[in-house]
Amino acid sequence: MERGRAPPPWRGWILCLLPALAGGQPLAAGEAAYEEWRATGVRGRAVELSCGPAAAAPPAVVFWSFTPQGEGLPRAVAVGSGREVAVAPGTAMLGRVTLRNGTLELRELRVAAQGRFLCQGLFPERGRLRVGYAAVLLRVLVPVSKPFVRPTAAAAAEGAAVALTCAVREGTEPLSFSWQHQEPRGGPSVTPARLGGSRAELRLTPANRSHTGWYSCTVHNEVNNRTSDPVYLDIVYGPDEPAIRVEPFSPEQGGFSAGEREDVVLSCLAPSNPPSRYVWLHNGTQVHVGQTYIIPAIARAQAGTYTCLAENSHLQTRTQATIVLTVYYPPAGSPSCSALASDDQRDVALRCRWLGGFPLARLRWVGPQEEEEEEGLMGTSFSMATRIQPGAATRNGSSFSCLASHPALPLGAACGTTLWVPSGSPTCAAAATKGDEYVMLRCRWEGGAPLVTLRWRDSAGRALGDPAPSSAVLVLGTDGSLGGREFVCEAAHPLRAAAAECRLRLEVPELEAESEVAVLEGGEAQLACRHRGGSASLGATVAWYDPKEREVTPGLAKYRLEQGEAWVNLTVRDAEWPGDSGIYRCTATNAVGTASLPVRLRVDRYPAPPNVTISKLRYTRARTEVRLEWRTQGAGNLTGFVVQRRQTKKPLREPPSPWETAAGDIEPHSRDRRLGGLDPAVLYAFRVLAVNHRTAGHPSEVQTPAEPPFEAYPAVTGAAVAGMLVATAASLLAVHCIARHRESLPRLHRLLFRTAGPAAQEPLGTAEEAEAAAGGEEGAGPAQGDPSVPGTAAAAEAAPAQGDPSVPSTAAEPLSAAPGTTEDPPVNVTITVTATP
């Protein structure tokens, strides 16, 4: 406000007017400018919201309102005119609110201030006021609080899955995370790459010993970044497989040797956390505890197997390593025999092995029907002996023996093997890896001696992969060319003249579905799709796509998916016409290809509901309720009725009030309704509509209620009848009393019972005669309702019999009244009752 100049005359009243617009309603003014922009603030800090461009002049009068995010009701914040500023109560939830020169400043900003601020201002321009609007969408950012690290366990075994979670109590998203790792004995902090170091959860799967150390995380957002305190993670591992060192180092084939009476030092090392506990076993018996075992002056009896057993007391795990220490004595145990295929599956290599001892054992092979040869002849070997047996010349089930001799063994030793071919044939199977990246073909044929050799080939006979005994696995990349290809697994054995085989064909899945499905609008349409696999079942992923080629996923409100092993059904809920009609597509995908099948969905509309006419509409006596009856015309689908009302009398220039629902959800079999809650001083108009599942019918004709019928006639007639009965009873009682008290009331008696003319009755002389005469007269009196008695005749005339056509009845009730009719004309009824003594 300029000094020395009076404020404009409009400033005072506009300051009072603007709070009345606190609903956030725009001021009605032509040529109004509207601007909208976004602003960002930080909780606890200050933010300024300007009402228009920064270079523009401040408004003369400004009004600020606020609409919270997600709500539709605006709230007044502040209003100002020059230096006159008023802040609405309850704005403390937004922060400390101040208004200066039309700019709204929020200090100590709170999260509740996030929403839409609307500024409505009057800007002086060339002697007039211009209305301007500015909407500011304020976003309140919350700084990141100090995070903390929560590991799944402070100590974990190596190989287990360990996860560290970086938790933060508050902070505006998006949040970014970074992890730091420091070794236990110090060193630089590094980011654990390749372990999900950029997410809120750091997974060490599997954890290894290099993961031991200190971990901390840093959280960033638009406002700030904070780092947590370090947390120590201890990875418990081991013990690893021990390594045994022998001194003096005298290796032998299959072990170590030592001379009798020689000092031998055995050392064992097995890395572990915590450090391992070592136990030495000699031929299975504990002989020493510690990492180093010293055997002074070893004796022949101390030869054999030495086992180093390493134990982790924390994990309760053990590992061991064993060496054979020979002290110049015959080998322990007995020889071992085996059979292997050789020379491209044409021959069998028989191998016999018996290591150790001093001197070495002598081995030789003996076949069926062969005589045992003397020692020193051809075919004898030391420690190991091999014999090549032609497969074509060997019968299935033939047995061969390996004979071993040693000077320390008078009877020698032997081992044997039997050559045989497994029964049956190889079996083939195919499977797809996760994500259908590869197809794995597996061929199995177990048993036999030697084992069966398996190898994969394509349909052209080209070899794929390397041969393998008993089981052969071939991994193929899914490059789109595998569909329809055939693969052969060949099984070879030296004792078989011809190779056995099994075949696999990789095929794209086949789909089955109905070509068209029809449903009425509002119903559920079920689209069924089924797939069939080929000779090599790779499974299939079945999916549905809507008419807009969008994949239907579980959790959508519009659709429901039901899936079995080989089928997927799509249910379209609450089908709409024509939006849900169209071509839906079912696709099945496996590792070698994709199949697709269209299904047309046709949504038909419900027939229109019938028309309705109002047959009766009338007020009750209190005019707070109406009784409404209607009927339908024609056929049509019907699920209910809706009754609407509105006021009929309005000023000439005021538009009619809108229709409001007086009663809804009326059952389809109902044809009447009693409606209350009416204002007796208001004239209403009613109409009825029939509805079905989707459509509302034509509204009925508009009618106003008729006035209630006049009900005074029954009340007046009832009062007249009651009066006549009372008068008649009183007259009879009076006559009876006068007749019984003739002497006490002589004048009344003569007046009532005197007679004239020659037929006059003789006077009664005694009281007994008077009582007899009175009794006779009383018994012979006229019956009630006799027209000879004046009193009863008058009563009969005053109370005509019910249903007498001479008595006017109530007029028939009109169905409805014209809108201008407010009440019936008055009716005057006069009833006179006369009683004659």
Image (spheres, rainbow, N blue to C red):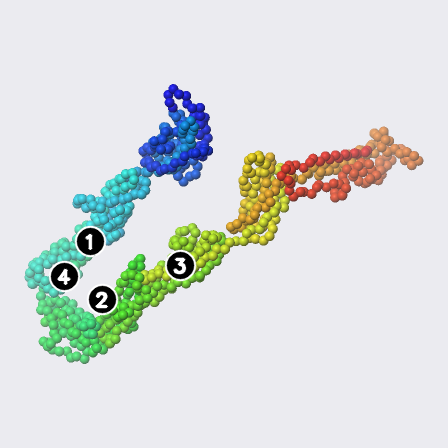
| Furthest residue toward front | 126
Asked if labels 3 and 2 touch by Cβ distance under 8 angstroms, the answer is no
Q: Is residue 303 above or below residue 364?
A: above
- The span from disc 1 to disc 2 (Cα, nearest Å) is 36 Å
Nearer-N-terminus badge (3/4): 4
Q: Which residue is mark 1?
A: 238
Q: Position of residue 386 (x, y in %)?
A: 15, 72
Q: Which residue is mark 3?
A: 586
User: As shown in the figure, which amino acid type bears the numbered disc 3?
Assistant: Cys
User: Quadrant location of the N terminus?
Assistant: top left
Residue that appears at 22% across and 66% down: 466
Q: Which residue is mark 4?
A: 323
Q: Which residue is mark 2?
A: 466
Residue that appears at 9% across and 67% down: 358
The residue tagged with tag 1: helix, strand or loop? loop
Q: Badge 1: how crowded within 10 Å, few (<14), some, or many (20+)? A: many
- The span from disc 1 to disc 4 (Cα, nearest Å) is 20 Å
Compare residues 711 and 639 and report the one nearer the observer.
639
Q: Nearer the viewer, mark 3 or mark 4?
A: 3
User: Quadrant location of the C terminus?
Assistant: top right
- The span from disc 2 to disc 3 (Cα, nearest Å) is 40 Å
Nearer-N-terminus badge (2/4): 4
Q: Is residue 440 above or below residue 835?
A: below
Q: Position of residue 446 (x, y in %)?
A: 26, 69
